[in-house]
Amino acid sequence: MDVTVSERDDTAIVSVDGRIDAESAERLDTAISAVLARGGKRVLVNLEKAAYMSSSGLRVLLGKFRALRRVDGEMALCSLQPDVYKVFLLAGVHEVFPIYVGLDEILATGDEEPEEEKTSP
């Protein structure tokens, strides 16, 4: 799994490519922790190329979501593949995270509030 972090205004975009499992979840944790360490408070996790997510990956995202909330930060997810979205549904945490349809829609909105995804992908 590859994790890349890019910046857009005051938002860190963490993009994942590959399987998020027990072995690779630490890389996702490290990437988001680095954003927090440098004072970042807005994280968007782009899961467009994430083919699979285990409970380990879900645990990392929930932990970082809570860490960001403690510092008045925020985390959102976008572009979840159907199999990844199922993990969120089965775990019952699909309503915890703001989940958006795609990265382009979020970035194109500028200062406007992006429209949340209402149905499963």
Image (tube, rainbow, N blue to C red):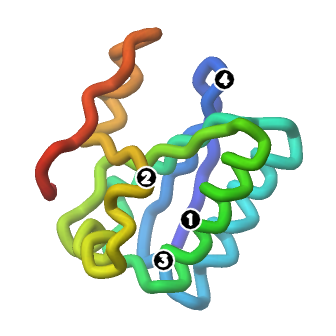
Q: Nearer the viewer, mark 3 or mark 1?
A: 1
Name which of mark 4 and mark 1 comes first in the sequence.
4
Secondary element type, mark 2: loop
Image marks 1 and 2: residues in contact by CB distance under 8 Å? yes
First in residue order: circle 2 vs circle 3: 3
Residue 59 vs residue 110: left or right? right
- What residue sits right under mark 4 in the picture? 10
Coordinates of residue 33 in the picture (x, y in percent): 77, 57
Query: Residue beneath label 2, please?
Result: 97
Q: Please indicate whether residue 48 sits to the left or right of residue 46 in the image.
A: left
Within 10 Å of disc 1 (Cα), the crowding (few <14, some 14-19, many 20+) is: many
Percent x, y of residue 86: 23, 74
Q: Residues within 10 Å of mark 3 (few under 14, many from 20)?
A: many
Q: Nearer the viewer, residue 107 or 41?
A: 41
Mark 3 and mark 4: Cα distance apart in space: 26 Å
Pointer 2 local density, CA inside 10 Å: few below 14, some 14–19, many at least 20: some
What type is the residue that disc 1 sits on? Leu
